[in-house]
Structure formats: C-alpha cells, structure tokens
Image: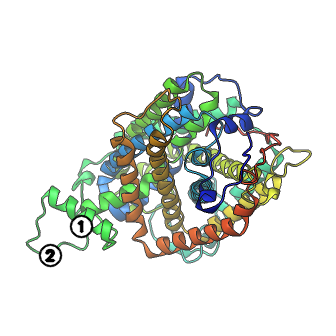
C-alpha cells in the first residue's frame, strides 16, 4: 500500500507504515504458524541463558552488589517482565516477522524507527562483541586445561590487566583480544556462506547451556560456604557520614537521588544493588527474540505472553540460584573475571566438571554470537530495503543468498570493538542501547492505545497504563545509573548525534515510504535458526 501524497514539514519525520502495508511486505517471507507456547518458552530460554550469566555476573558482584547480586537479579527480572508485557501486546497487534524497529515504524513514525535502529545496533552489534570477550575468557581457560597457553597480552583489550584463573594474580596487560576476533571471524564467515544450523543442533546447544547451569547449581551447592553470603549487602563505599539515617527506606531514597543527579554510580550498599541491576541487565537480553516469532505463532494473543513471561520466570529463578552458588564458592571480591563460573568450578577442584562447564559455555556463547550478528545484519537489511541506509546493505549474494556486504561490515565492526575494548565498556554501551530501546517499546504501547484504539489486540497489557509507564520509567532509571559513567555518557551522546546527522543527510531523502514507493524484492536471505 503506497502513499499517494508526500508528507511535508514535521509530519515528514513521523510518517508511518500502515499495519496492512507491513503485512504485505512480509507476506512472502513469513513462515507457517507452527510455534506453540512450549516452543516459544524454549526459544526464550535459549536466547536468554548464556551471555550475562556466564560473563557479567562476576563483575557485577565484585564491583557493585556483592552477594546482593541475587537481589539485583530480582530487580532486573521485574523490569523485564514489565517490558515483556508491552512486547507481548505489540507482537499480538502487529504479528510480523520484525523487531522493535518494525513496531516503531508502524506506530510512532520514521524518525522513531530510525532511533530504534540506532539503539538496536548497540543491542545486537555491540552485544556480539561483549559476548565475544566473554567467549574469549572461557576459550583461554579451556585451552589452558588442554595444555595450550595463549600469551596473556593477546587475550585482552589494550590496557586491561590479565589475571591468572587459579591465583588471581596479574600476569600481563592486554594488547589485543585475539581469541575474540577469531571467534567473530568464524561466525561472520558462517553467516556469509549461509550455512543454516539445523534445528537438532540448535536444540542440543540449548540443552547443553541449560544443562551446564543446572549442573553448576546442583553440584556447586554442596561446596557453598554460607559465610560468604554475609553480609548480603556489603557496606557502601565510601561510607556515608556519621549520623546518616541507614534505614532501608532512607538508603533507597538516597540511592534514587544519586542516580537521578548523577552524583555517584554506587558501590555496594543499596546504590550498588541498583548499579548491579543495570549491569546484569545484559543477562536478560534475548527475551524479546520471542516477540519476533509473532508471525510464526499459532495463537499470538495467547502464546506470546506465555512464551515471553514463562522464559523470563524460569531464567530468573535459574539466575538467582546460580548467583547464590557462585558467591558462596568464590569471595565476591575475586569475581571480577570474564569467566566467573569457570573460576568457581576451578576452585571446586573437580577437573572433569570444570572441563564440562567450560565446554558448555564455549558452545553456548558461540551460538549467541551467531544469532546476535545475524539479528544485526537482518536489521540493516530491513532498513536498507526501506531506503533509510544505502541499498548495498540489502544486496544478496547470487550464490549464497545472504546479505554478504552487510554481514562482512557488521563482522568487522564487531571484531574491532571486541579486540580493542574491555568487557566493562562494551557491556555498559550495550545495556544503554537496550534500555533506551525497551523504554521506547513501552511508550509505543501507550501511544498506540490512544492513537490507534481500534487495532485488533488479541493480548492487552494488564493494568494499563500503569504497567507500560512503570516499565518505561524503570528502564530510564537504570539507563541514568549507567549514564553516570562519563565515558559511557559521552559515547552515547556522540553516537546518537552522528546517527541523526546520517538520517538527515541520507535516510530522510531516500526513504521509500516518503517517496510513496512500495518496498519490493522480498527475497529472504538464508535463515539461521533463532535458537541459541
């Protein structure tokens, strides 16, 4: 359905695709409606488990929350549940094979869709780099068990100290994270060639990841020293002045004020719980992948909420139990490590178990890198088909049937970030982009309820408008806690400014929707199965 009248003025920035047009554009590429609630729950679990729990949990405990990292997971899980309800409503109302970019284009207009596209680059592209750094840590540890030792200078980003897994002693300073680059190179090659993973292989990888987490909980529980859980919330650093009200309510209010004013980022105490929640938010990235299966769900109105919320609840329980075991085996001060669970199983002293855990993490994180890069290339593919970025990003290889130029560029950028940036910076930037994207999704639900009240909504977010507004506010609150880091804030501001310049210099003038053109050429690149 093409527009017959070109928009002008400010209305040009908010031109929207109709839901009918989006259905028409995706009609030829949509799959059969074969996914039920169990399929969607397993998809969600496969997408969520792997990244944050294997990589960032240790850092959040060591630097911010201490044993209270368990509470941080409850905070973040609650936030994601609120966002998930908004995703469920949008997925049922606009059940196309798309993403938050597509939802924004259909509801709030092109400029918002462009912003969402920028944020999804951080969510998917930089997330792949972040996972690669964690994958590198587990790979180095696994190779060391096999007698292969990589010089420490080539296992971390420039200036990052490299510690020994057994002693915790500093053994070198990074120059280049070579394993991370090699891992992303292999994944990029697979995506260019278009070798699709079979459903069987994907299910095995998901089974391995979940099995490793459960095995760590079950076996590690007998090695837990409960004394390491105390104090659950370590004393705040620096300590408040003498005479300060230290009641929980007062601490929460001071923490909220500190975040809102940017006065501190919070280390330990209640502020540390909040900062820890923002840090381990990365562990939940992936639940929204369930919403992209809306066009393949048998009954989106019923099945999407079950899949999204069911996977979130299961993963939150597993996360809290994993954290309880992790901080009960290793003192939280020693957990600032890119492979914290590997560190814990090494201390248990069961070599066979340590090898199994590391091998499981290696396999699981490999698939996460694959799917994150895949998601980023397909977002660029969609934006190029819409004319918002150069059409070369939509060029499909004549033999492999994949957007090969797009894939190579995304892979090279991911390699650069993974090779030369540390885990902390990458995780913060990824979380900032994702939190901002989630806030927009929540606000999109509110906007659509009032702007398009007659759209069919098989599922409606309960307690509207409280639920989406609260979800948006929690996202913005955690976002501000991360923006208190000056390097993170500066990068994000410069990144958004550059993105807006690109839109006004290119996207605005080449938008097919603004020209009244129908987006054609629905050839679908060879798919990679979405299970992680």
Quadrant position of residue 32? top right
Residue found at the very far right of the displayed protein: 398
Count residues near mark 1 (Cα–Cα under 10 Å), then give few for <14, some for 14-19, many for 20+. Answer: some
Horizontal arrangement in the rendering, residue 282 relative to residue 325 (left or right): right
Image spot of residue 335 (x, y percent): 41, 60
Question: How many numbered tags mark residues here?
Answer: 2
Residue at position x 25%, y 63% in the image: 255
Residue bearing the label numbered 1: 236
Q: Distance between the residues labelled 2 and 1?
A: 11 Å
Quadrant position of residue 405? bottom right
Residue at position x 84%, y 52% in the image: 395
- Image quadrant in which the C terminus is located: top right
Residue 460 higher or lower than 241, as above or below: above
Q: Is residue 140 visible?
A: no
Image spot of residue 296 (x, y percent): 64, 28
Under circle 2, the secondary element is loop
- Image quadrant in which the N terminus is located: top right
Residue bearing the label numbered 2: 241
Quadrant position of residue 481? bottom left
Under circle 1, the secondary element is loop
Answer whether labels 2 and 1 touch (C-beta < 8 Å): no
Q: Which of 71 and 137 is in front in this view?
A: 71
Count residues near mark 2 (Cα–Cα under 10 Å), then give few for <14, some for 14-19, many for 20+. Answer: few
Horizontal arrangement in the rendering, residue 34 relative to residue 486 (left or right): right
Image spot of residue 520 (x, y percent): 81, 43
Residue 312 higher or lower than 330, as above or below: above
Image spot of residue 377 (x, y percent): 71, 52
Mark 2 or 1, nearer chain start: 1
Horizontal arrangement in the rendering, residue 412 relative to residue 116 (left or right): right
């Amino acid at each position: 359905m093409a527009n017959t009248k070109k928009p002008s003025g400010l209305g040009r920035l908010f031109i929207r695709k109709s839901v009918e047009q989006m259905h028409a554009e995706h009609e030829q590429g949509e799959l059969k409606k074969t996914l039920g609630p169990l399929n969607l729950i397993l998809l969600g679990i496969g997408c969520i488990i792997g990244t944050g729990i294997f990589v960032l949990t240790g850092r959040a405990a060591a630097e911010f929350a201490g044993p209270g990292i368990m509470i941080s997971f409850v905070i973040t899980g609650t936030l994601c549940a609120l966002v998930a309800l908004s995703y469920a409503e949008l997925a049922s109302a606009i059940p196309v094979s798309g993403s938050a970019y597509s939802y924004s284009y259909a509801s709030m207009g092109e400029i918002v869709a462009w912003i969402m596209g920028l944020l999804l680059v951080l969510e998917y592209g930089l997330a792949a780099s972040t996972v690669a750094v964690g994958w590198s840590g587990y790979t180095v540890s696994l190779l060391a068990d096999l007698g292969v030792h990589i010089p420490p200078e080539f296992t971390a980003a420039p200036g990052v100290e490299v510690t020994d897994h057994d002693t915790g002693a500093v053994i070198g300073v990074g120059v280049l994270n070579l394993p991370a680059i090699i891992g992303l190179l292999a994944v990029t090659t697979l995506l260019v060639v278009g070798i699709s993973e079979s459903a069987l292989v994907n299910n095995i990888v998901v089974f391995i990841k979940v099995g490793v987490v459960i095995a760590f909980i079950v076996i590690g529980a007998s090695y837990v020293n409960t004394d390491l859980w105390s104090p659950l919330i370590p004393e705040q650093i620096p300590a408040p002045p003498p005479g300060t009200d230290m009641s929980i309510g007062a601490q929460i209010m001071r923490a909220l004020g500190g975040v809102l004013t940017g006065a501190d980022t919070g280390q330990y105490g209640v502020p540390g719980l909040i900062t820890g929640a923002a840090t381990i938010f990365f562990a939940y990235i992936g639940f929204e992948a369930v919403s992209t299966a809306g066009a393949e769900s048998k009954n989106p109105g019923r099945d999407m909420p079950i899949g999204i919320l069911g996977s979130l609840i299961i993963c939150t329980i597993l996360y809290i139990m994993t954290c309880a075991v992790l901080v009960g085996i290793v003192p939280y001060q020693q957990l600032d490590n890119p492979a914290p669970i590997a560190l814990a199983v090494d201390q248990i002293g069961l070599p066979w178990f340590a090898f199994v855990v590391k091998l499981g993490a290696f396999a699981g994180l490999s698939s996460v890198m694959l799917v994150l890069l895949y998601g980023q290339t397909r977002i660029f593919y969609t934006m190029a088909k819409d004319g918002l970025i150069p059409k070369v990003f939509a060029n499909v290889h004549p033999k492999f049937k994949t957007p090969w130029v797009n894939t190579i560029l995304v892979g090279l950028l991911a390699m650069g970030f993974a090779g030369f940036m540390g885990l902390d910076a990458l995780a913060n930037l990824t979380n900032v982009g994702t939190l901002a994207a989630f806030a927009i999704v929540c606000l999109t639900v509110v906007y659509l309820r009032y702007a398009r009240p007659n759209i069919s909504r098989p599922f409606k977010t309960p307690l509207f408008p409280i639920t989406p507004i609260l979800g948006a506010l929690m996202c913005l609150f955690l976002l501000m806690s991360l923006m208190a880091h000056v390097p993170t804030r500066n990068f994000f501001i410069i990144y958004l400014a550059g993105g807006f310049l690109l839109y006004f210099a290119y996207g605005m003038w080449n938008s097919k929707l603004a020209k009244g053109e129908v987006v054609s050429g629905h050839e679908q690149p060879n798919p990679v199965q979405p299970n992680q």
